[in-house]
Image: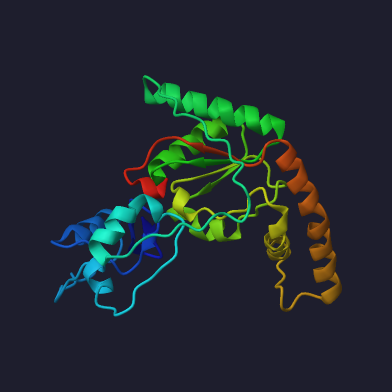
Amino acid sequence: MVKDGEVVIVDEFTGRLMPGRRYSDGLHQALEAKENVKIERENQTLATITFQNYFRMYKKLAGMTGTAETEAEEFYKIYKLEVNVIPTNRTLIRTEYSDVIYRTEREKYNAVVNEIKELHEQGRPVLVGTISIEKSEKLSTLLKRQGIPHVVLNAKYHAKEARSSPSRTQEGSNHRNQHGRTRNGYSSGRQSRIPYLQTLREKNLDADTAPKDEYERIRKHWLDVCPKEHDEVVNMGGLHILGTERHEARRIE
């Protein structure tokens, strides 16, 4: 994608931007010429090392992630590290449904849009996952045709993602091109700090410089609203997560 006059590579697995990374053998220069931006000189690679070998240079190695168990065998083969699973603080109450297979992509997306529309009419928040920016924008076009308000969260709009409110007041659906970067909280009233910071931005105010009475008024409003919305969403079944297709790596799921 093009950002600030530069061609920036997007990681196909995580959906993250990779500033500073460039394609070799003139491919990046060809993309710069195609996008009509300044053509930079090709970088010269003096040495390379894989992440696995780089990490193995450390004397002590450990980590924590929510997606390690599915790759436990790989962690042991490469680093001789075992994976220990820490039980969740609360009992998992998520309901998981089996995959639904469609004959054509068109039928699948029609079914996805219909399901989102039905949930939106109920007032239930929806988080939709796609595997690429292209697919997320295609789905966005279909949702617009149905008049369903939504926010697209992918590498093109990562700044908007950082500001995105978890409040139910932001009606409609949120869909993104990678689940791996999703914050927990689209249906949680406990994260009421994010909505009131967004309200301050909309009023061109800053949390540090805003008048104290105005700041407290906005903060109190969201502290009252978010718990109520949280209870409403929970009573409807909570945040509905809709995956449109499987990723190549299970840990991204």
Residue ID at (44%, 46%): 177
Report the quarter where the C terminus lies.
top left
Residue ID at (72%, 53%): 189
The answer, for residue 108, to whether it is visible in the render is: yes
Looking at the image, how many numbered discs can be counted on the residues?
0
Residue 43 place in picture, x, y as percent: 19, 72
Vertical side of 71 occupied by 101: above or below: above
Residue ID at (27%, 66%): 79
* Residue 35 located left or right of residue 237: left
Q: Quadrant of residue 61?
A: bottom left
Residue 174 place in picture, x, y as percent: 57, 44
Residue 66 place in picture, x, y as percent: 46, 56
* Residue 95 located left or right of residue 168: left
Vertical side of 164 occupied by 138: above or below: above
Relative depth, front residue between 68 and 46: 68
What colour scheme was applied to this rendering of the protein? rainbow
Residue 31 place in picture, x, y as percent: 24, 56
Relative depth, front residue between 13 and 57: 57
